[in-house]
Every structure is written in structure tokens, then in C-alpha cells.
Image: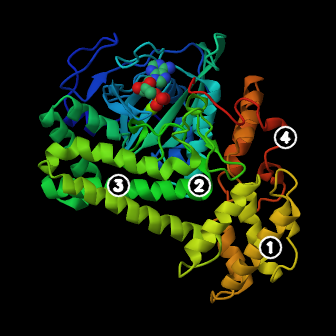
Amino acid sequence: MSVPGFTSRFVDSLPGDPLTHNEPRQVRGALWSKALPTPVSAPTLLAHSREVAALLGLSEAVLNEPAFLSVLAGNEPAPGVTPFAANYGGHQFGHWAGQLGDGRAIGLGELNGFELQLKGAGPTPYSRRGDGRAVLRSSIREFLCSEAMHHLGVPTTRALSLVLTGDRVVRDMFYDGHPEPEPGAIVCRVAKSFLRFGNFELCASRDDVALLRQLGEFTLTHYFPHLGPPSKDSFAGLLTEVAERTASLMAQWQAVGFVHGVMNTDNMSMLGLTIDYGPYGWVDDFDPGWTPNTTDAEQRRYRFGNQPGIGLWNIERLGIALLPLLEDEESLVEAAMLAYQRTFEAEASRRFTAKLGLTPRDGTVELTHSLFSFLAAEETDMTLFFRALSDVVEAGVPTTFPDALRTAFYGTPTEAHLARGLEWLRTWWERTREEAATPAVLAQRMRAVNPKYVLRNYLAQEAIDAAHAGDVSGVRTLLEVLRRPFDEQPGQEKFSQKRPDWARSKPGCSALSCSS
Ligand code: AMP
Ligand code: MG
């Protein structure tokens, strides 16, 4: 058994930086720089995803080989390829931030058509003042959420492995002048491509149209071959498809209650994948104004209810960057933005009506919106509420506010609120009788789209606390439970409970900083 050979279309076909040292610098005329992982002292494989291993054609035997662990820890080069950091820029919190690049992600190349990338494997030319490392808590969060999202059916980068490095990393978790050493870790991320809007924006910001074109042609050829050979039309097709994929992704985030937290354009995937899990969170109570990211607490630019609008703003940034390939035809950018809006409306409506057991028709959008305003009026757990509706559909027309739904309230609702809820439930229940399916069949369909298990912030934090104390079993258990988010899973109910009171304002459970 030996470590399989890697290949790399990115490194082989696109211009790289002639310099090979790690000093921070502006890199022009190149889309990547060579970046060797920095070895760590005592790597341990804490967890891995068997589905991702299978995608890559890696057997359990290979994964457990010391030589492969060395690759996942960055202690040995991946055979066959130059490790690299990609060069990109981005709009951060609404402002152009210039060159950013992979400051702590190192691309290893491809296996089976998938790129592998080590996050936290040491500095690169793009690390600026950062150390290129990642701490265990944020690595656990990235590892678990990537896999949880995949099993929910949401497009995402994946995670092959979670490796403890054996080295400490100093972080000021709250940016309050109290830096502390924390255990370091490395996640091996996996995706067909890690290209971001920001890769294109950086070329455009420097008026490097030749490089922009090379990147555009590479993207079309390898990831969007159905759009035809490179031309103004196929680049317009590319922009529209990215817009549609992004819109569809936003509809899916809203439907499961996921808040990314840092939707900067350097964190937006050209393939429409959820990418860069940082201070993300899951809404417990349905609050469109909520953001988990403390860095964004004032402006709340990336709050739950704002994600679809930000997705559109980001598409506009990508469109403007691509203008030189569109022969400066601004109407093509407008068309892509329109496609975004149409797709978002259709997908969001389809997904939310399906959550209610309905097929879209006259009145279903209004019904959904009146539910949103009901849910937002008093703290109500989004996941629990939608899941419990499938029990209500089976029980017959509600005459009192159902107990199954009462458990979703965080506080004690007023009688007036319950009356309003009951009225909504009765209208909705009558609507379900216009569907051809029996209540039992409807309930089954609803359970297949309303997850019972999501990676609640406090669950991730409990697993992190245990891992810090040396017990990684919580991470593995969560990984298992989150593989089947729509199944009842008798015995695992404790992972489907609403946020306990102690977690309401505990760091990591409600608010997170970007320090990771
Ligand atoms: P993020 O907010 O995680 O998307 O990161 C924004 C930029 O900062 C990207 O260019 C990252 O590669 C870089 N970055 C974040 N953390 C570190 C770190 N610890 N060391 C070096 N670069 C980092
Ligand atoms: Mg990022």
C-alpha cells in the first residue's frame, strides 16, 4: 500500500509566481505561489470522513498509513505535485481589500478530480501578519459543518480529515488583549475547485486582462465545459450559472437556518459551494437579524435575513470583474443579476413550501411569509418548529395550539401569540388537504426536508470543550449523528434539543470572533 500520486491542473496550466520564498509580498502576473507546508511535531488523526475518503478513492488502509498521515499533517509533500497557495483578492465587509490569497491554506493538488487543501499547515506568501495556522476549535467546526452540510444536501466543500498537530497556536480569541496558547490542528478540505470570486476580482483590479482571460478559460474548460469554448457568450453563460448556483445556495442556507457570517467575496465559491467555515452559526430561534460573527455585531451586514441580498451584491462584484471578458457589456451583468433574483425567489419558495408539505401555488408565498413573521415575533426554534409540523399534519386539524410546537418556544408565549399561531396552523392545515397525498405521506415528505439534527452552535462547542480535555469521542459521535440529519435516530434525541439556557450567551455557542 502506498500513498497515491497527486496531479494538478491548476498548477500545470496556470502561471505561477517565480519566487519561492515565504516572505509576504504582492504577487502580480501569477495565480499561485509555491508554498511548502511547515512540519508539525506530533500529528494525530482525530477524525476522518469515510464518504470523502471514498470520493477520493482512498481505502481505510491508506488513510491509516503513517505515510499518509504525514501528508495530511504537512510533514511530507504529497507525491507528484508542487504545493501551492492561490492568489486572490476580495471585497471584505463591503470594501475592496486588495490582495488576500491563501494565507493558511495550501493546495496539494488533485486526487480523482478533487482538489485537496490543508488549512492550517503554515505560512505562505499570502499570510501577511498571520501565522498560517489554525486552532483545534475552529478546525473541529470546519470539519463537522462541512460534512453536516453535505448530508443536509447543501453544496459545500468537504473535509477529509482532522489532524491534531501537537503544537500550540497563540490566539486572542476575543481580540481583547488576552492571547493564549491553544492546540493547533489541520483540516484537509476537499472540493472540485476552491476558486473564489476574489481570484477574478484581483486580476481585474490590476487591469491584468490577459491573466483574467487565462483564469476564465481555465474555469470554463474544466468546470463548465457544457457552456462551450471560451467566448463572450460562454463567459456570460459562466456568470449567469455562477449567479444561479449562488442564488440556489442562498435559498438552501435560509431553508436550514445556516448563517455563514463572513460573506466576503473571497469566501464566495465559483462552483456555488459553501466555503470557508469561520464564525458561522445556526439560528436557534428564527431571527432574521441574527449574526454569529462578533466582528460584524454593529453593522450586521451578514445577518441571517441579509444573506440573499449579499449574495446578489457579490454577484455584481464578480460581474464587474468579468466585464473585460464580456466586451464591457454591462447588460450581461444585469442579466445575471436578474437570473440570480429569479432563481432565488423560485428556489426559496420551492424549499419553504416543501418544508410545509405543500407544492407552490397561489397563496403559498404569503403563507410562508406570515409564518416567518409569527416565528420572529417570539423566540421560536426554527429547526424544532418545522420538524414538529410533520406531527401536526398527521394529527388532524388543530383545535388548540399543539404541544409538539410549544416545545419550540424559548420563553412563555402570550395567549394572543398562541391564538395567532393557531389561526395560521388551521389555514395551513386546510391547505395541506388540497395536496393529493395522505397526511401520513405528507408527514413523511416533510421529515425528508426538515432536519431533526443540525450542528447547533452549543453542540459543536460541547464537542470542542471535550476535545480540549483530550476526549475526541464527541466529535466522532456528532459526525455520525449528522450523517443522517433527517432520520429519527432513537437514542440520539439529546442532539436534537433546543439551545439550553446556559448556552444563550456563552462564547462559541452564540457569538464567535474571526480569530481562528
Ligand atoms: P478569512 O476571514 O478566514 O476568510 O481570511 C481572510 C484572509 O486572511 C485570507 O487571505 C486568509 O488566508 C487570511 N488568514 C486568515 N487567518 C490566517 C492566519 N492564521 N494566518 C495567515 N493568514 C490568515
Ligand atoms: Mg476566507
Question: Which numbered disc, 2 or 1, marks the residue that appears first in the sequence?
Answer: 2
Location of the C terminus (image quadrant): top right
Report whether residue 113 is seen. no
Q: How is the image coloured?
A: rainbow
**Callout 3 amino acid:** Ala
Real-space Cα separation, disc 3 to disc 1, in angstroms? 39 Å
What distance separates the C-alpha of mark 2 from that of mark 3?
23 Å
As rendered, which of 434 and 142 lies closer to the eye? 434
Where residue 48 sits, quadrant-wise, is: top right
For residue 507, the mark is none
Q: Position of residue 138 (x, y in %)?
A: 60, 29
**Which secondary structure lies at badge 4?**
helix
Q: Tag 1 or tag 4, which sits nearer the N-term?
A: 1
Q: CB at mark 3 closer than 8 A to ligand 2?
A: no
Residue linked to disc 2: 151
Which numbered mark, 3 or 1, is in the foreground of this view? 1
Image coordinates of residue 36 in percent, x first then y, are 38, 18
The residue under label 1 is 422
Q: Are marks 2 and 1 in contact (CB under 8 Å)?
A: no
x, y percentage for residue 69? 53, 27
Answer few, some or many: residues within 10 Å of disc 1's Cα (few below 14, many 20 plus, some between 14 and 19). some
